[in-house]
Image (tube, grey):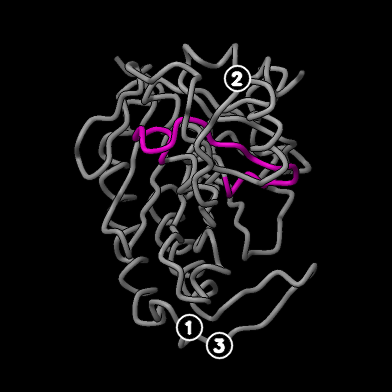
Amino acid sequence: MLAPSFDFLPSLGQAVRDAAREAGAMALPFFRAGGQTAARLWFKERSSPVTEADIALDNFLKERLSRLMPEAGWLSEETEDDSARLDRRFVWIVDPIDGTRAFASGHPDWSISIALVADGRPVLGVIHAPTHEQLYEASLGSGASRNGKRLSVSHAAPLDHVRVAGPQPLVDHLGRRIGPIEHLPKVPSLALRLARVADGSIDVGLVSANSHDWDIAAADLILGEAGALLTDFDGVPPVYNQVRPRHGEMVAVASRLHPRAIGAMRA
C-alpha cells in the first residue's frame, strides 16, 4: 500500500504516461532508422550532441509536467540548472531524449526518461522507447510494468553465463571475476539499458562513471519495483537532487544476485 503522502501517484502516473507518449510522437518525425536525423544537430560541451528534437521535447515536458505538479522543482539535461530545485521536496528529473547519439544516427535504442523524486529518491518513473513501442513505468510500492505487463526478476538466473550490457572495460572486469558471460551490445540509452534489466532481457547492466540523475532516476525505481537493485560497487544506492547530480560506476542486477555482482566488481 502506498504511503498516505504518495497516494496521488496512480492518477499522476497516468498523466505522465500520456505526456511521455506525446513526447515520443513529437520525436519520431525527426528519427530516420539507419540514417542521419532530420533534426538540426549541434554540439555542446565535451562534444555532446543535441538536436532540435531534444529541445522541443524538453520544452513540452517542462510545461506539461510543471502544470501537473507546480510545486515540484525541475532538473533536465537540456535546461540550465536552477539551484532552487534543492529546496523542493519534489523534483521532476527528465531526459527528453536519452541516447541522443543513437537518435541522431538512426539507432533505435533511445528513450524518453521521466522521474518524480521525493526527498532524494524516485517515487514515479516512466521510460518510453518510441521506436520499440515500449513503455516502462513504476510508482513507489505499486510494482513495475512494461506495456501494462508486470515485471519481476525474482527468477533471475545465477551469475553463470549471464547476459551483460555496458562499457567494455567493466564488462571485461566482471567476466574475469565470474567466468564466461555473454557480452550483449551496449544499449546507447542508459535508461533503456537499465529498464531491460528490469524486464529480464539483460541480466547485469553496468554503468560507467559520470552518469547524471536524468539518465538513471526513472530506471532506478523501475528496477526496484521489479525486484532488482541499482547501486555503486559498495552497494550504496544513488541519491538524487543533490548539488552535483552525477554518479560513479554502478551495477544493476536482480536483488538476490546483487551481493555476488558487487563483490565481483570490487575485486
Q: How crowded is mark 3: few (under 14 residues within 10 Å), some or many (20 or more)?
A: few
- The spot of residue 1 in percent (x, y) is 29, 14
Q: What residue type is labelled 3?
A: Arg
Is residue 69 in the magenta section?
no
Position of 20 relative to 192 (above/below): below
Q: Quadrant of residue 11?
A: top left
The tag on residue 261 is 2
On residue 37, the disc is: 1
* Separation of marks 3 and 1 at Cα, in angstroms: 8 Å
The residue drawn where x is 44% and y is 30% is 223
Find numbered disc 3 in the image and state the secondary structure of the residue it sits on: loop
2 or 3: tag closer to the N-terminus: 3
Q: Which residue is drawn at 32% across and 26% down?
A: 7
Is residue 246 toward the left or the right of residue 134 in the image? right
Q: Name the residue under label 3.
A: 40
Extreme residue toward the front, this view: 180
